[in-house]
Every structure is written in C-alpha cells, then in structure tokens.
Amino acid sequence: MTKEKMAIGILGAGQLAQMTCEAGRALGFDMHVYANHAQEPATFVADRTWVGDLTDYEQLQQFAESVSVITFDTELLPMDAVSYVAQFAKVYPNPDILWIAQHRERERLFLRDQGITMPRIAFVHTHEDIASAVDQVGVPAVLKTVEQGYDGKGQRKITRPDEAIEAWEFLGRVPCVLEEWLDNPLEMSVIVAGSEAHGMAAFPVIDNEHQNHILHQSSVPSQLPVEIQSRAEQIAIFIAHSLHLIGLLTIEMFYTKDGRVLVNELAPRPHNSGHHTQLSTVTSQFEQLIRAITGLELGDVTTKPAAMINLLGDLFLQQSTSHPIYQHVGFVDPHDKEEQNVFFYGKQEARVGRKLGHIIAVGENVQDATAKAQRIYAGYVLREDDVCRD
C-alpha cells in the first residue's frame, strides 16, 4: 500500500483522532474524520470532516468510499456501524478486536483463553449470580458494567457481601463483572504496534498514576524492576500476536504488592498514557498507528525520559470559553520558560473530569522530567486567573 493520494478515515473526532490526523498529514496522507458535531477536536485539523450519526448508513458509506483504510479513536462505537464501513474499506485494528475490547466479559474470556493472568473475576448477569460471584471473588471487590465503562464510570466498590446487590441495582441491573479489589497496585501500560508486513514494535513500559479514576500522570522510563518490565512487554506482544494485530493496541496492567503482573484492560487505539511520545520518542504513537495501517515500515521507538500530565476541565471551570485556550489547537503556554509543550485540544467547554489538554516534559532522567512537568502543572493551577485575563 503506497501513500500517494491515499486517504485515511477515522471513526470519531476527539483528541486522539486530532493527533492522529496531524501525524497522518505530516506523512503526506489525506485525513478524513467522521464526527458527531462540527466542533470536535479533530475537525480543526482534518482534510475532510463528515458530520453525522453512526446510524446514517448512506453517509457512512460515502465516508468509507472516500478513503482506503479506516481506524477509530474510541471503543465506544456500535459494531453495526463498524461492520458496515468494513464492506467498503479496510478497518484496522480488525473489528473483531474492537468487539472484544468494548465488552468487559468478552475481553476477560479472551484473556482467560490465552492464559493471561488477571484479577480474580466472576460474571453477574442476574440477581441469582451475585452470591456465587462474591463467594468466588471475595471482598473487597469492584463491580463493573460490561459495557460503557471508562475513567471510573460504571463501577462500584463492594466492601461487604451484603453490599453486592445494592451495587448491582445502582449500576442498573445490567450484566457486570465482579473483580478482585487490589490494594494500591502500581499501574503501567504497554503500547504495541502491529503491521502486516513489518511485524510488531512495543513502546517502552509506561508508569501511570490516576486521580479519581482518571489518568493524571504518565512517565518513562518505568521505575519498575527490569524483569517486571520485560514480563509486561512479553505479555503485551503475546496478546497482540494472539489478536493478529494491525494497528495499535494498548494493554493496561497492574503490578501488585505480592508480585503479580495482571492485565486490566485492552484499548485498540492510541492511548492517553502514550501522549508523551509526541516529544519523547523518535516515532510518536500517532505516527506509528499511521505506519501500521498503511504498510509503511514501523518507526523507531527509542524514547527519552519524559512525563505527561493531563489538564482537566476542573482547572478551568471559572474561565470564559471565549478565551483562546479553548479555541487554539496545540497551544503552547507562553509562561513556560523551559520550552516544554502544553497542548490543548480546542474543546469549547470545560467540565469536571473532561480532558482539555496535556503537558509533556522531557528531561535528563525520569525524575527530572517529572519535576519539570509538575512545576508547569502547579504553575498552571496557580495562574488560572492570569491565563484567562485579556
């Protein structure tokens, strides 16, 4: 597959699609996005935007026929729409991978079949399943809906057996997975690229820290023992091979106090924890995705020490959305004297927990990079009134 006059489509137009569009255009591709509305982040940088519902099959067909290959920026897509566009263009990663990753029960069953270690689990479909699930998993535990769960949504912690029924009812009496509660595990992710012609390439293990179930900070190189990093990379590549991956796959994992490496979930797309690759790595995760799905040779994943911190809407709720901070894509903080970049996605509204942008800092070592990123972040919090002042 050559890149001359080739167009790539993305189902979804959020910030992941935005940064993928930028990478694709830099490689000479035309980038088309299918958006819910005309002000989504990727619409600012795409060569062509299709705005519509994912049930509008006539427009979906027109979108698919305008490109040679399609990818996506979220697992939260109706499979009917994905299967439909696959009739007119190649879709990578394969829709079967999306079908697994968007449903926690299917995902856990796949991982179990591959012999992958996970937290203890049991499935809850009906009221009658709850008692046996608690017996299998024990407490404390966390009950998670099998669909539509991300950034802590669709979850309920259980500390006593008698709380299980209440938790299931709170979540809407829908199919759930009951999982072992882990006591402050270390969290990490591995991003793997798979190419039909050029094999697999894994980015270095990323250490992650969450606040209120949302990723707050990521850093490389990982500070976990080398043998644990090696095990995590081996697990990630094994899973990618098992899925015959073409595209990107992120594997989120836990390292527990008792020495277990446990897979948490799969995301077949660029990942928030990989944003640091925009500045730290020879080939960013976004460029690597483009390379993987178009048949180009996979890029070098040599990575400098770096840290990334998310900027959430919580920081800017008192600011006017007419300020350029909301309008400008790739905004660089003028107060930043260390020449480390602050990226904004051009979203028009600040909301609690909504990702509006991120900070990336590169340093001599991970401690230096983390300190730089945290200084920029702290200054941003203190300066929020100054940032919105004309």
Image (cartoon, rainbow, N blue to C red):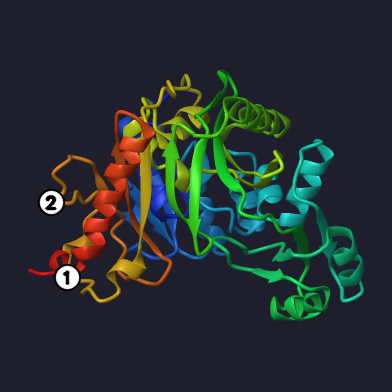
Image quarter where the C terminus lies is bottom left
Residue at the image position 79 percent from the left and 65 percent from the top: 139
Which residue is depicted at the point 21% across and 74% down?
320
Q: Is 114 left, or right, of 284 in this rendering?
A: right
Q: Which mark is residue 385?
A: 1
Spot occupied by residue 240 in the image (x, y as percentages of width and height): 66, 32
The image shows a total of numbered marks equal to: 2
Disc 2 target residue: 334
Against 278, residue 202 (above or below) is above
The quadrant in which residue 155 appears is bottom right
Q: Which mark is residue 23?
A: none
User: For the view shown, which residue lies furthest in the left direction?
Assistant: 390
Towards the viewer: 137 or 243: 137
SS for dot 1: helix
Q: Please, what is the three-letter code of the amino acid marked with disc 1?
A: Asp
In this rendering, does residue 68 appear at all?
yes
Residue 293 on image: x %, y %: 52, 31
Residue type of the residue flagged with mark 2: Pro
Going from N to C along the chain, the mark reached first, 2 or 1, is: 2
Local packing at callout 2 (Cα closer than 10 Å; few below 14, some 14-19, many 20+) is: few
Viewer-proximal residue, 317 or 82?
A: 317
Asked whether, in this view, residue 42 is left or right of residue 326, the answer is right
Q: Residue at x 62, y 63 (%)?
A: 149
